[in-house]
Amino acid sequence: MCKGLATVVMLLLSLCVYGQETITLPLNKESLHSTMIGVGGANILDTYLSPYNYTGTDIRIQRETQRMTTLWGGRVSNQVLIDVNGAINKNHVRNIKEYAGGIRYSQGWFYQFAGGNTVNPVERSSSPWNLAAGLAASGYLGGIYIDRSGNNPAQAKADLMIDMSAMATYDMVIAKHHYLWRYQVSVPLMGIAFSPNYGQSYYEAFELRHHDHNVVFAYPGNMPSMRHRLTLDIPIRRTVLRVGYVAQFNQSTFNHLKYHSYTHDFMIGFNKYFYRR
Amino acid sequence: MKKNLSLIVLSLSLMVFHSCVQEDHYDNSKQGNFEALWKIMNEHYCFFDYKKGELGVDWDEVHARYAAKVNEGMNNTQLFEVLTAMLSELKDGHVNLSASFDFGRNWSFYEDYPENYNDSIAKLYLGHNYSIASGLKYITLDDNIGYVRCESFVEGIGDGNVSSMLNALANCNGLIIDVRGNGGGQLTKAQTLASHFTNKKLLVGYVSHKTGKGRNDFSTPKAVYLDPASDGFRWQKPVVVLTNRAVYSAANDFVKCMKLCPNVTIMGDRTGGGSGMPFTSELPNGWTVRYSAVIFYDADMQHTEFGIEPNISLAMSGADLAQKKDTYIEKARVYLGGGK
Protein backbone atom coordinates (compact mmCIF):
# COMPACT_ATOMS: atom_id res chain seq x y z
CA MET A 1 0.00 0.00 0.00
CA CYS A 2 2.85 2.36 0.88
CA LYS A 3 4.62 1.96 -2.47
CA GLY A 4 1.39 2.34 -4.44
CA LEU A 5 0.63 5.63 -2.77
CA ALA A 6 4.19 6.78 -3.29
CA THR A 7 3.69 6.30 -7.04
CA VAL A 8 0.52 8.41 -6.92
CA VAL A 9 2.34 11.17 -5.06
CA MET A 10 5.23 11.14 -7.54
CA LEU A 11 2.84 11.33 -10.50
CA LEU A 12 0.82 14.19 -9.05
CA LEU A 13 3.84 16.22 -8.04
CA SER A 14 5.58 15.72 -11.37
CA LEU A 15 2.45 16.90 -13.19
CA CYS A 16 2.44 20.02 -11.03
CA VAL A 17 5.84 21.07 -12.30
CA TYR A 18 4.71 21.62 -15.86
CA GLY A 19 2.23 23.80 -17.69
CA GLN A 20 2.19 26.98 -15.61
CA GLU A 21 1.40 30.35 -17.17
CA THR A 22 2.53 33.48 -15.37
CA ILE A 23 -0.30 35.89 -14.64
CA THR A 24 -0.53 38.79 -12.27
CA LEU A 25 -3.53 38.95 -10.01
CA PRO A 26 -4.60 41.89 -7.97
CA LEU A 27 -4.88 41.38 -4.23
CA ASN A 28 -8.32 40.25 -3.46
CA LYS A 29 -10.46 39.66 -0.48
CA GLU A 30 -12.20 36.53 -1.41
CA SER A 31 -11.96 33.38 0.66
CA LEU A 32 -12.83 29.77 0.08
CA HIS A 33 -14.68 27.84 2.76
CA SER A 34 -15.34 24.14 2.60
CA THR A 35 -16.70 21.56 4.97
CA MET A 36 -16.49 17.85 4.34
CA ILE A 37 -17.48 14.75 6.23
CA GLY A 38 -16.26 11.31 5.41
CA VAL A 39 -15.95 7.71 6.40
CA GLY A 40 -13.28 5.13 5.80
CA GLY A 41 -10.90 2.74 7.47
CA ALA A 42 -8.35 2.96 10.26
CA ASN A 43 -5.34 0.88 11.21
CA ILE A 44 -3.72 1.82 14.52
CA LEU A 45 -0.71 0.43 16.34
CA ASP A 46 0.46 1.75 19.69
CA THR A 47 2.89 -0.53 21.45
CA TYR A 48 2.35 1.30 24.75
CA LEU A 49 -1.09 -0.31 24.75
CA SER A 50 -0.73 -3.40 22.57
CA PRO A 51 1.79 -4.98 20.20
CA TYR A 52 -0.98 -5.55 17.63
CA ASN A 53 -2.68 -3.48 14.97
CA TYR A 54 -6.28 -2.50 15.63
CA THR A 55 -8.46 -1.97 12.57
CA GLY A 56 -11.90 -0.54 12.07
CA THR A 57 -13.96 2.38 10.86
CA ASP A 58 -12.83 5.97 10.77
CA ILE A 59 -15.08 9.04 10.63
CA ARG A 60 -13.62 12.41 9.67
CA ILE A 61 -14.73 16.02 9.44
CA GLN A 62 -12.63 18.68 7.77
CA ARG A 63 -13.22 22.40 7.74
CA GLU A 64 -11.00 24.45 5.45
CA THR A 65 -10.62 28.16 4.83
CA GLN A 66 -8.30 29.56 2.19
CA ARG A 67 -7.64 33.16 1.24
CA MET A 68 -5.01 35.22 -0.54
CA THR A 69 -2.94 37.56 1.60
CA THR A 70 -0.99 40.75 0.89
CA LEU A 71 2.31 39.02 1.70
CA TRP A 72 5.04 38.87 -0.94
CA GLY A 73 3.19 41.07 -3.35
CA GLY A 74 0.01 39.11 -2.96
CA ARG A 75 1.57 35.80 -3.92
CA VAL A 76 1.01 34.10 -0.59
CA SER A 77 -2.20 32.38 0.38
CA ASN A 78 -3.30 31.33 3.84
CA GLN A 79 -5.02 28.08 4.70
CA VAL A 80 -6.69 27.12 7.97
CA LEU A 81 -7.55 23.45 8.19
CA ILE A 82 -9.39 21.88 11.10
CA ASP A 83 -9.36 18.11 10.92
CA VAL A 84 -11.34 16.00 13.39
CA ASN A 85 -11.46 12.23 13.29
CA GLY A 86 -12.67 9.35 15.41
CA ALA A 87 -12.19 5.63 14.92
CA ILE A 88 -13.67 2.52 16.47
CA ASN A 89 -11.36 -0.43 16.03
CA LYS A 90 -10.88 -3.99 17.14
CA ASN A 91 -7.83 -6.20 17.43
CA HIS A 92 -7.14 -8.95 14.92
CA VAL A 93 -9.15 -11.55 16.80
CA ARG A 94 -11.97 -8.99 17.24
CA ASN A 95 -12.40 -9.48 21.00
CA ILE A 96 -11.07 -6.13 22.27
CA LYS A 97 -12.38 -2.73 21.24
CA GLU A 98 -10.38 0.46 20.81
CA TYR A 99 -11.52 4.07 20.50
CA ALA A 100 -9.18 6.59 18.92
CA GLY A 101 -9.52 10.14 17.76
CA GLY A 102 -8.34 13.67 17.88
CA ILE A 103 -8.30 17.11 16.37
CA ARG A 104 -5.60 18.82 14.34
CA TYR A 105 -5.55 22.55 13.75
CA SER A 106 -3.28 23.72 10.99
CA GLN A 107 -2.51 27.19 9.73
CA GLY A 108 -0.32 27.42 6.64
CA TRP A 109 1.11 30.02 4.28
CA PHE A 110 1.64 29.03 0.65
CA TYR A 111 3.68 30.72 -2.05
CA GLN A 112 1.76 30.69 -5.31
CA PHE A 113 4.09 29.74 -8.13
CA ALA A 114 3.99 31.56 -11.44
CA GLY A 115 1.43 34.01 -10.17
CA GLY A 116 -1.10 31.27 -9.81
CA ASN A 117 -4.01 31.14 -7.40
CA THR A 118 -5.00 27.94 -5.66
CA VAL A 119 -7.74 29.72 -3.71
CA ASN A 120 -9.94 30.36 -6.74
CA PRO A 121 -8.08 29.06 -9.76
CA VAL A 122 -11.14 28.88 -11.99
CA GLU A 123 -11.72 32.63 -11.91
CA ARG A 124 -8.27 33.93 -10.96
CA SER A 125 -5.83 31.90 -12.98
CA SER A 126 -5.35 31.63 -16.71
CA SER A 127 -3.62 28.30 -16.41
CA PRO A 128 -5.41 25.04 -15.73
CA TRP A 129 -2.54 24.07 -13.44
CA ASN A 130 -1.67 25.92 -10.26
CA LEU A 131 0.94 25.01 -7.73
CA ALA A 132 1.69 26.36 -4.28
CA ALA A 133 3.99 25.28 -1.50
CA GLY A 134 4.76 26.51 1.96
CA LEU A 135 4.91 25.87 5.64
CA ALA A 136 2.19 25.28 8.16
CA ALA A 137 2.06 25.35 11.93
CA SER A 138 -0.10 22.54 13.21
CA GLY A 139 -1.15 21.19 16.55
CA TYR A 140 -2.76 17.87 17.40
CA LEU A 141 -4.60 16.69 20.48
CA GLY A 142 -6.06 13.23 20.70
CA GLY A 143 -5.98 9.88 22.37
CA ILE A 144 -6.51 6.15 22.22
CA TYR A 145 -8.51 4.07 24.68
CA ILE A 146 -8.61 0.28 24.82
CA ASP A 147 -11.48 -1.20 26.83
CA ARG A 148 -9.38 -4.13 27.99
CA SER A 149 -8.56 -3.23 31.56
CA GLY A 150 -8.48 -0.56 34.22
CA ASN A 151 -4.69 -0.26 34.38
CA ASN A 152 -3.25 2.31 31.99
CA PRO A 153 -5.79 1.63 29.24
CA ALA A 154 -5.32 4.93 27.43
CA GLN A 155 -2.69 6.84 25.57
CA ALA A 156 -2.67 10.60 24.97
CA LYS A 157 -1.42 12.07 21.72
CA ALA A 158 -0.28 15.65 21.26
CA ASP A 159 2.16 17.52 19.06
CA LEU A 160 3.06 20.99 17.85
CA MET A 161 4.71 20.81 14.44
CA ILE A 162 5.99 22.79 11.53
CA ASP A 163 4.76 21.02 8.40
CA MET A 164 5.97 21.34 4.85
CA SER A 165 3.03 21.33 2.52
CA ALA A 166 2.39 21.57 -1.20
CA MET A 167 -0.85 21.84 -3.10
CA ALA A 168 -1.81 21.68 -6.72
CA THR A 169 -5.02 22.39 -8.59
CA TYR A 170 -6.16 21.38 -12.05
CA ASP A 171 -9.12 23.00 -13.75
CA MET A 172 -10.73 20.33 -15.89
CA VAL A 173 -13.29 21.83 -18.30
CA ILE A 174 -15.99 19.54 -19.66
CA ALA A 175 -18.88 21.03 -21.66
CA LYS A 176 -18.01 24.50 -20.34
CA HIS A 177 -18.25 23.28 -16.77
CA HIS A 178 -15.21 23.62 -14.56
CA TYR A 179 -14.35 20.58 -12.51
CA LEU A 180 -11.55 21.51 -10.16
CA TRP A 181 -9.14 18.92 -8.85
CA ARG A 182 -7.18 19.79 -5.74
CA TYR A 183 -4.37 17.80 -4.21
CA GLN A 184 -2.42 18.61 -1.07
CA VAL A 185 0.35 16.77 0.72
CA SER A 186 1.74 17.74 4.13
CA VAL A 187 4.81 16.32 5.81
CA PRO A 188 5.69 17.22 9.43
CA LEU A 189 9.20 18.66 9.47
CA MET A 190 9.99 19.40 13.08
CA GLY A 191 8.38 20.22 16.38
CA ILE A 192 7.64 18.77 19.76
CA ALA A 193 5.41 15.89 20.73
CA PHE A 194 4.17 14.25 23.92
CA SER A 195 4.99 10.66 24.73
CA PRO A 196 5.18 8.66 27.95
CA ASN A 197 8.45 6.86 28.42
CA TYR A 198 8.60 3.17 27.51
CA GLY A 199 7.11 1.77 30.71
CA GLN A 200 6.10 5.00 32.42
CA SER A 201 2.64 5.15 33.92
CA TYR A 202 0.33 8.11 33.55
CA TYR A 203 0.14 8.15 37.34
CA GLU A 204 3.82 9.08 37.42
CA ALA A 205 3.59 11.60 34.59
CA PHE A 206 0.50 13.46 35.71
CA GLU A 207 -0.23 12.65 39.38
CA LEU A 208 3.35 12.65 40.66
CA ARG A 209 4.60 14.98 37.89
CA HIS A 210 7.64 12.80 37.36
CA HIS A 211 8.53 13.74 33.81
CA ASP A 212 10.89 11.54 31.84
CA HIS A 213 11.48 12.58 28.23
CA ASN A 214 7.77 13.22 27.87
CA VAL A 215 8.26 16.14 25.51
CA VAL A 216 10.36 14.93 22.62
CA PHE A 217 11.83 16.70 19.63
CA ALA A 218 10.02 15.33 16.61
CA TYR A 219 11.41 15.19 13.09
CA PRO A 220 10.95 12.86 10.12
CA GLY A 221 13.49 10.44 11.61
CA ASN A 222 11.27 9.62 14.60
CA MET A 223 7.95 10.88 13.28
CA PRO A 224 7.80 9.91 9.59
CA SER A 225 4.30 11.04 8.80
CA MET A 226 2.34 12.53 5.93
CA ARG A 227 -1.17 13.59 5.11
CA HIS A 228 -2.79 13.60 1.66
CA ARG A 229 -5.95 15.21 0.42
CA LEU A 230 -7.38 14.82 -3.06
CA THR A 231 -10.67 16.56 -3.85
CA LEU A 232 -12.84 17.30 -6.84
CA ASP A 233 -15.08 20.38 -6.87
CA ILE A 234 -18.22 19.80 -8.91
CA PRO A 235 -20.35 22.86 -9.76
CA ILE A 236 -24.06 22.23 -9.35
CA ARG A 237 -25.91 25.43 -10.30
CA ARG A 238 -24.83 28.00 -7.70
CA THR A 239 -23.44 25.40 -5.36
CA VAL A 240 -20.13 23.56 -5.50
CA LEU A 241 -20.14 19.99 -4.33
CA ARG A 242 -16.81 18.69 -3.10
CA VAL A 243 -15.91 15.02 -3.01
CA GLY A 244 -12.56 13.76 -1.94
CA TYR A 245 -10.21 11.22 -0.48
CA VAL A 246 -8.09 11.83 2.61
CA ALA A 247 -5.23 9.53 3.52
CA GLN A 248 -3.17 10.11 6.63
CA PHE A 249 -0.07 8.23 7.69
CA ASN A 250 0.88 9.33 11.17
CA GLN A 251 3.78 7.45 12.73
CA SER A 252 6.27 7.84 15.55
CA THR A 253 8.96 5.92 17.41
CA PHE A 254 9.39 7.97 20.58
CA ASN A 255 11.00 6.42 23.69
CA HIS A 256 11.14 2.95 22.10
CA LEU A 257 7.36 3.03 21.66
CA LYS A 258 6.03 2.39 18.18
CA TYR A 259 2.93 4.12 16.91
CA HIS A 260 1.13 4.32 13.63
CA SER A 261 -2.28 5.54 12.62
CA TYR A 262 -3.12 4.88 9.00
CA THR A 263 -6.52 6.22 7.99
CA HIS A 264 -8.24 6.71 4.67
CA ASP A 265 -11.58 8.41 4.28
CA PHE A 266 -13.90 9.14 1.38
CA MET A 267 -15.24 12.63 1.88
CA ILE A 268 -18.18 14.70 0.68
CA GLY A 269 -19.11 18.29 1.37
CA PHE A 270 -19.64 21.76 -0.04
CA ASN A 271 -17.58 24.80 -1.03
CA LYS A 272 -18.47 28.43 -0.74
CA TYR A 273 -16.64 31.61 -1.72
CA PHE A 274 -17.05 34.70 0.40
CA TYR A 275 -16.02 38.25 -0.42
CA ARG A 276 -14.88 40.67 2.24
CA ARG A 277 -15.41 44.40 1.80
CA MET B 1 12.35 26.96 -7.32
CA LYS B 2 9.13 25.24 -8.16
CA LYS B 3 10.96 22.10 -9.21
CA ASN B 4 13.20 22.22 -6.15
CA LEU B 5 10.26 22.45 -3.77
CA SER B 6 8.49 19.62 -5.54
CA LEU B 7 11.62 17.52 -5.23
CA ILE B 8 11.91 18.30 -1.51
CA VAL B 9 8.30 17.32 -0.86
CA LEU B 10 8.71 14.28 -3.07
CA SER B 11 11.86 13.21 -1.22
CA LEU B 12 10.20 13.61 2.16
CA SER B 13 7.18 11.68 0.94
CA LEU B 14 9.30 8.80 -0.28
CA MET B 15 11.25 8.77 2.98
CA VAL B 16 8.01 8.53 4.93
CA PHE B 17 6.67 5.73 2.75
CA HIS B 18 9.81 3.72 3.23
CA SER B 19 9.67 4.20 7.01
CA CYS B 20 6.50 2.28 7.83
CA VAL B 21 6.39 1.75 11.59
CA GLN B 22 5.35 -1.82 12.34
CA GLU B 23 5.81 -4.30 15.17
CA ASP B 24 6.99 -7.88 14.69
CA HIS B 25 4.22 -10.35 15.45
CA TYR B 26 4.08 -13.98 16.39
CA ASP B 27 1.52 -16.14 14.61
CA ASN B 28 -1.59 -17.37 16.39
CA SER B 29 -0.26 -20.86 17.00
CA LYS B 30 0.36 -22.51 20.36
CA GLN B 31 4.09 -21.87 20.03
CA GLY B 32 3.44 -18.33 18.75
CA ASN B 33 1.29 -17.47 21.76
CA PHE B 34 3.86 -18.94 24.14
CA GLU B 35 6.68 -16.95 22.56
CA ALA B 36 4.58 -13.77 22.49
CA LEU B 37 3.78 -14.08 26.20
CA TRP B 38 7.37 -14.78 27.17
CA LYS B 39 8.56 -11.81 25.09
CA ILE B 40 5.97 -9.38 26.51
CA MET B 41 7.05 -10.31 30.02
CA ASN B 42 10.72 -10.26 29.09
CA GLU B 43 10.51 -6.73 27.75
CA HIS B 44 8.08 -5.17 30.23
CA TYR B 45 8.06 -6.99 33.60
CA CYS B 46 9.81 -4.95 36.27
CA PHE B 47 10.78 -7.43 39.01
CA PHE B 48 13.06 -9.93 37.24
CA ASP B 49 16.14 -8.95 39.24
CA TYR B 50 14.27 -8.96 42.53
CA LYS B 51 12.51 -12.27 41.85
CA LYS B 52 15.79 -13.87 40.80
CA GLY B 53 17.25 -12.89 44.15
CA GLU B 54 14.23 -13.84 46.25
CA LEU B 55 12.85 -16.83 44.35
CA GLY B 56 15.70 -17.88 42.07
CA VAL B 57 13.59 -17.30 38.97
CA ASP B 58 15.72 -17.18 35.82
CA TRP B 59 13.43 -16.04 33.00
CA ASP B 60 15.64 -17.60 30.30
CA GLU B 61 15.60 -20.92 32.10
CA VAL B 62 11.81 -20.57 32.47
CA HIS B 63 11.56 -20.18 28.69
CA ALA B 64 13.53 -23.35 28.04
CA ARG B 65 11.55 -25.35 30.59
CA TYR B 66 8.08 -24.29 29.46
CA ALA B 67 8.78 -24.21 25.70
CA ALA B 68 9.22 -27.97 25.95
CA LYS B 69 5.67 -28.26 27.32
CA VAL B 70 4.01 -26.47 24.39
CA ASN B 71 2.97 -28.30 21.25
CA GLU B 72 0.47 -27.68 18.49
CA GLY B 73 -1.60 -30.70 19.48
CA MET B 74 -2.69 -29.25 22.80
CA ASN B 75 -6.06 -27.54 23.21
CA ASN B 76 -6.61 -24.00 24.47
CA THR B 77 -7.31 -25.11 28.03
CA GLN B 78 -4.05 -27.00 28.16
CA LEU B 79 -2.16 -24.05 26.67
CA PHE B 80 -3.78 -21.76 29.22
CA GLU B 81 -2.62 -24.03 32.05
CA VAL B 82 0.96 -24.10 30.79
CA LEU B 83 1.11 -20.34 30.28
CA THR B 84 -0.42 -19.66 33.69
CA ALA B 85 2.06 -22.04 35.31
CA MET B 86 4.90 -20.18 33.61
CA LEU B 87 3.62 -16.83 34.90
CA SER B 88 3.09 -18.30 38.37
CA GLU B 89 6.85 -18.80 38.68
CA LEU B 90 6.99 -15.07 39.45
CA LYS B 91 4.58 -15.35 42.42
CA ASP B 92 3.09 -11.99 41.59
CA GLY B 93 -0.59 -11.30 42.21
CA HIS B 94 -0.44 -8.57 39.56
CA VAL B 95 0.54 -11.09 36.90
CA ASN B 96 -2.53 -12.63 35.34
CA LEU B 97 -3.61 -14.30 32.14
CA SER B 98 -7.19 -13.66 31.16
CA ALA B 99 -9.26 -15.65 28.68
CA SER B 100 -13.00 -15.87 28.23
CA PHE B 101 -13.07 -19.19 30.11
CA ASP B 102 -10.59 -18.59 32.95
CA PHE B 103 -8.45 -16.14 34.89
CA GLY B 104 -4.91 -17.36 35.43
CA ARG B 105 -3.36 -16.15 38.70
CA ASN B 106 -1.00 -16.86 41.54
CA TRP B 107 -2.59 -15.72 44.74
CA SER B 108 -0.17 -17.52 47.03
CA PHE B 109 0.56 -14.19 48.71
CA TYR B 110 -2.53 -14.79 50.83
CA GLU B 111 -3.77 -18.29 49.98
CA ASP B 112 -0.71 -19.85 51.60
CA TYR B 113 -1.24 -18.04 54.90
CA PRO B 114 -3.84 -17.85 57.69
CA GLU B 115 -6.68 -15.54 56.76
CA ASN B 116 -6.71 -13.78 60.14
CA TYR B 117 -10.08 -12.32 59.32
CA ASN B 118 -13.60 -13.56 59.74
CA ASP B 119 -16.11 -11.49 57.89
CA SER B 120 -19.11 -12.68 59.92
CA ILE B 121 -17.45 -11.77 63.20
CA ALA B 122 -16.08 -8.44 61.95
CA LYS B 123 -19.60 -7.51 60.87
CA LEU B 124 -20.78 -7.95 64.45
CA TYR B 125 -18.66 -4.94 65.43
CA LEU B 126 -20.26 -2.80 62.72
CA GLY B 127 -23.75 -3.96 63.61
CA HIS B 128 -26.55 -2.46 61.55
CA ASN B 129 -26.25 1.21 62.41
CA TYR B 130 -22.91 1.98 60.87
CA SER B 131 -22.39 4.85 58.44
CA ILE B 132 -20.87 4.68 54.96
CA ALA B 133 -18.71 7.38 53.42
CA SER B 134 -17.99 6.31 49.84
CA GLY B 135 -17.18 2.73 50.74
CA LEU B 136 -15.70 3.49 54.17
CA LYS B 137 -17.96 1.86 56.78
CA TYR B 138 -17.58 3.37 60.25
CA ILE B 139 -19.05 3.34 63.72
CA THR B 140 -18.13 4.31 67.28
CA LEU B 141 -17.62 1.21 69.40
CA ASP B 142 -19.00 1.16 72.94
CA ASP B 143 -15.58 1.93 74.48
CA ASN B 144 -15.44 5.15 72.47
CA ILE B 145 -13.01 3.79 69.87
CA GLY B 146 -13.79 4.57 66.24
CA TYR B 147 -13.85 1.59 63.89
CA VAL B 148 -13.45 2.05 60.12
CA ARG B 149 -13.80 -0.85 57.74
CA CYS B 150 -12.03 -0.16 54.42
CA GLU B 151 -12.58 -3.12 52.12
CA SER B 152 -11.33 -1.63 48.88
CA PHE B 153 -9.83 1.41 47.19
CA VAL B 154 -11.81 0.85 44.01
CA GLU B 155 -14.51 3.32 45.00
CA GLY B 156 -13.84 7.01 44.70
CA ILE B 157 -12.84 8.05 48.21
CA GLY B 158 -12.55 11.84 48.34
CA ASP B 159 -11.28 14.34 50.89
CA GLY B 160 -14.87 15.27 51.66
CA ASN B 161 -15.77 11.67 52.48
CA VAL B 162 -12.78 11.19 54.76
CA SER B 163 -13.26 14.54 56.51
CA SER B 164 -16.93 13.88 57.14
CA MET B 165 -16.14 10.48 58.56
CA LEU B 166 -13.33 11.74 60.81
CA ASN B 167 -15.48 14.62 61.96
CA ALA B 168 -18.21 12.18 62.97
CA LEU B 169 -15.62 10.14 64.93
CA ALA B 170 -13.88 13.21 66.38
CA ASN B 171 -14.89 12.46 69.97
CA CYS B 172 -13.39 8.97 69.89
CA ASN B 173 -10.23 8.30 71.90
CA GLY B 174 -8.61 6.38 69.06
CA LEU B 175 -9.27 5.00 65.64
CA ILE B 176 -9.05 1.53 64.14
CA ILE B 177 -8.72 1.34 60.36
CA ASP B 178 -9.33 -2.24 59.31
CA VAL B 179 -7.95 -2.91 55.80
CA ARG B 180 -7.78 -6.69 56.10
CA GLY B 181 -8.72 -8.29 52.79
CA ASN B 182 -8.38 -5.01 50.93
CA GLY B 183 -7.00 -6.09 47.55
CA GLY B 184 -6.32 -2.55 46.33
CA GLY B 185 -7.85 -0.27 43.74
CA GLN B 186 -6.84 3.27 42.96
CA LEU B 187 -3.51 4.40 44.35
CA THR B 188 -4.71 7.99 44.52
CA LYS B 189 -7.62 6.98 46.77
CA ALA B 190 -5.32 5.14 49.16
CA GLN B 191 -3.15 8.23 49.40
CA THR B 192 -6.18 10.48 49.84
CA LEU B 193 -7.15 8.50 52.92
CA ALA B 194 -3.58 8.43 54.29
CA SER B 195 -3.15 12.17 53.78
CA HIS B 196 -5.57 12.84 56.64
CA PHE B 197 -3.17 11.31 59.18
CA THR B 198 -0.15 13.54 58.78
CA ASN B 199 0.40 17.24 59.36
CA LYS B 200 3.56 17.48 57.30
CA LYS B 201 4.80 16.32 53.92
CA LEU B 202 6.32 12.85 54.20
CA LEU B 203 8.76 11.00 51.97
CA VAL B 204 6.94 7.69 51.54
CA GLY B 205 8.97 5.99 48.82
CA TYR B 206 10.48 6.02 45.38
CA VAL B 207 9.21 4.99 41.96
CA SER B 208 10.99 3.72 38.88
CA HIS B 209 9.75 2.53 35.47
CA LYS B 210 11.17 0.69 32.48
CA THR B 211 12.85 2.87 29.87
CA GLY B 212 13.51 0.16 27.31
CA LYS B 213 13.21 -3.52 26.46
CA GLY B 214 16.31 -4.58 28.39
CA ARG B 215 15.66 -6.22 31.75
CA ASN B 216 17.81 -3.61 33.47
CA ASP B 217 16.51 -0.58 31.58
CA PHE B 218 15.03 1.48 34.42
CA SER B 219 14.62 5.15 35.12
CA THR B 220 16.41 6.72 38.08
CA PRO B 221 14.10 6.25 41.09
CA LYS B 222 12.25 9.44 41.97
CA ALA B 223 10.92 10.36 45.38
CA VAL B 224 7.22 10.07 46.18
CA TYR B 225 5.77 12.28 48.87
CA LEU B 226 2.56 12.17 50.86
CA ASP B 227 1.16 15.67 51.26
CA PRO B 228 -1.09 16.36 54.24
CA ALA B 229 -4.73 16.85 53.29
CA SER B 230 -5.06 20.53 52.48
CA ASP B 231 -8.80 20.64 53.04
CA GLY B 232 -10.89 19.21 55.80
CA PHE B 233 -10.18 17.17 58.90
CA ARG B 234 -6.75 15.78 59.86
CA TRP B 235 -6.78 13.13 62.62
CA GLN B 236 -4.48 13.87 65.58
CA LYS B 237 -5.18 10.96 67.94
CA PRO B 238 -3.75 7.40 67.99
CA VAL B 239 -4.58 5.12 65.09
CA VAL B 240 -4.23 1.38 64.60
CA VAL B 241 -4.25 -0.08 61.10
CA LEU B 242 -5.20 -3.77 60.98
CA THR B 243 -3.54 -5.85 58.26
CA ASN B 244 -3.41 -9.38 56.97
CA ARG B 245 -1.86 -11.20 54.02
CA ALA B 246 -4.71 -10.23 51.72
CA VAL B 247 -3.78 -6.54 51.92
CA TYR B 248 -2.45 -5.99 48.43
CA SER B 249 -1.51 -3.44 45.80
CA ALA B 250 -2.96 0.03 46.58
CA ALA B 251 -3.86 -1.19 50.09
CA ASN B 252 -0.23 -2.26 50.54
CA ASP B 253 0.77 1.26 49.52
CA PHE B 254 -1.71 2.68 52.03
CA VAL B 255 -0.07 0.67 54.82
CA LYS B 256 3.36 1.80 53.59
CA CYS B 257 2.26 5.44 53.92
CA MET B 258 0.41 4.99 57.21
CA LYS B 259 3.41 3.30 58.81
CA LEU B 260 5.28 6.58 58.38
CA CYS B 261 2.51 8.76 59.79
CA PRO B 262 2.74 9.87 63.45
CA ASN B 263 0.50 8.19 66.02
CA VAL B 264 -0.11 5.24 63.67
CA THR B 265 0.60 1.63 64.61
CA ILE B 266 0.32 -1.24 62.15
CA MET B 267 -1.06 -4.36 63.84
CA GLY B 268 -1.71 -7.81 62.47
CA ASP B 269 -0.01 -10.00 59.87
CA ARG B 270 2.45 -9.02 57.16
CA THR B 271 0.69 -7.49 54.15
CA GLY B 272 0.48 -9.36 50.86
CA GLY B 273 2.58 -6.86 48.91
CA GLY B 274 2.05 -6.10 45.23
CA SER B 275 4.23 -3.04 44.85
CA GLY B 276 4.33 -3.08 41.06
CA MET B 277 1.87 -0.96 39.13
CA PRO B 278 0.29 -3.25 36.55
CA PHE B 279 0.00 -2.73 32.81
CA THR B 280 -1.77 -5.01 30.35
CA SER B 281 -1.04 -6.40 26.93
CA GLU B 282 -2.40 -9.17 24.74
CA LEU B 283 -1.46 -12.36 22.94
CA PRO B 284 -2.01 -13.29 19.28
CA ASN B 285 -5.10 -15.32 20.30
CA GLY B 286 -6.65 -12.34 22.12
CA TRP B 287 -5.92 -13.44 25.68
CA THR B 288 -5.00 -10.55 27.95
CA VAL B 289 -1.89 -10.58 30.10
CA ARG B 290 -1.39 -8.28 33.09
CA TYR B 291 2.03 -7.67 34.56
CA SER B 292 3.85 -5.43 37.05
CA ALA B 293 5.49 -2.64 35.09
CA VAL B 294 6.43 0.13 37.53
CA ILE B 295 8.33 -0.44 40.80
CA PHE B 296 7.27 1.37 43.96
CA TYR B 297 9.92 1.22 46.69
CA ASP B 298 9.49 2.23 50.31
CA ALA B 299 11.18 5.28 51.87
CA ASP B 300 14.35 3.22 52.46
CA MET B 301 14.46 2.16 48.78
CA GLN B 302 13.43 -1.37 49.75
CA HIS B 303 10.93 -3.51 47.87
CA THR B 304 7.50 -4.11 49.38
CA GLU B 305 6.53 -6.55 46.62
CA PHE B 306 6.30 -9.34 49.20
CA GLY B 307 4.63 -7.26 51.88
CA ILE B 308 5.20 -4.96 54.84
CA GLU B 309 5.85 -6.15 58.37
CA PRO B 310 3.46 -4.78 61.02
CA ASN B 311 4.69 -2.93 64.10
CA ILE B 312 2.87 -5.47 66.26
CA SER B 313 2.30 -8.99 64.98
CA LEU B 314 -1.00 -10.68 65.74
CA ALA B 315 -2.75 -13.94 64.98
CA MET B 316 -6.42 -14.69 65.33
CA SER B 317 -7.13 -16.71 68.42
CA GLY B 318 -9.28 -19.81 68.16
CA ALA B 319 -10.71 -19.09 71.59
CA ASP B 320 -11.75 -15.60 70.48
CA LEU B 321 -13.34 -16.96 67.33
CA ALA B 322 -15.32 -19.43 69.42
CA GLN B 323 -16.64 -16.49 71.44
CA LYS B 324 -17.38 -14.57 68.21
CA LYS B 325 -14.66 -12.08 68.97
CA ASP B 326 -12.11 -10.67 66.55
CA THR B 327 -8.68 -10.89 68.19
CA TYR B 328 -7.33 -8.10 66.02
CA ILE B 329 -10.06 -5.62 66.89
CA GLU B 330 -9.98 -6.52 70.56
CA LYS B 331 -6.20 -6.08 70.80
CA ALA B 332 -6.41 -2.80 68.93
CA ARG B 333 -9.08 -1.50 71.32
CA VAL B 334 -6.92 -2.33 74.30
CA TYR B 335 -3.92 -0.74 72.65
CA LEU B 336 -5.91 2.44 72.11
CA GLY B 337 -7.05 2.55 75.71
CA GLY B 338 -10.43 0.96 75.25
CA GLY B 339 -11.50 -2.66 75.41
CA LYS B 340 -12.75 -4.69 78.29
Image: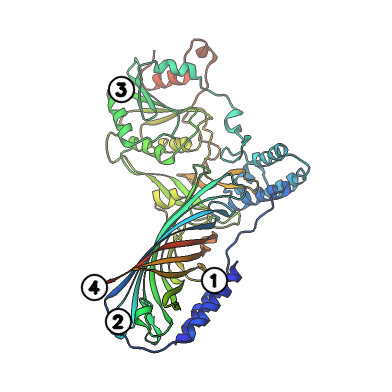
| Helix, strand or loop under label 4 | loop
Mark nearest the camera among 4 and 2 is 4
Which of the numbered marks, if any, corresponds to residue A71? 2
Instruction: Specify whether disc 4 shares its chain with disc 2.
Output: yes
Instruction: Specify whether disc 3 shares its chain with disc 4.
Output: no
Please report, as a chain letter, where disc 1 is located. Answer: B
The colour scheme of the drawn protein is: rainbow
Ranked by sequence position, the earlier of labels 3 and 1 is 1
Residue to which mark 4 is pinned: A276
Which of the numbered marks, if any, corresponds to residue B16? 1
* Mark pair 3, 1: CA separation: 68 Å
* Mark pair 3, 2: CA separation: 76 Å
Please report, as a chain letter, where disc 2 is located. Answer: A
Ranked by sequence position, the earlier of labels 4 and 2 is 2
Viewer-nearest residue: A48 or A57: A57
* Mark pair 4, 2: CA separation: 17 Å
The amino acid type, in three-letter code, at marker 3 is: Cys
The amino acid type, in three-letter code, at marker 1 is: Val
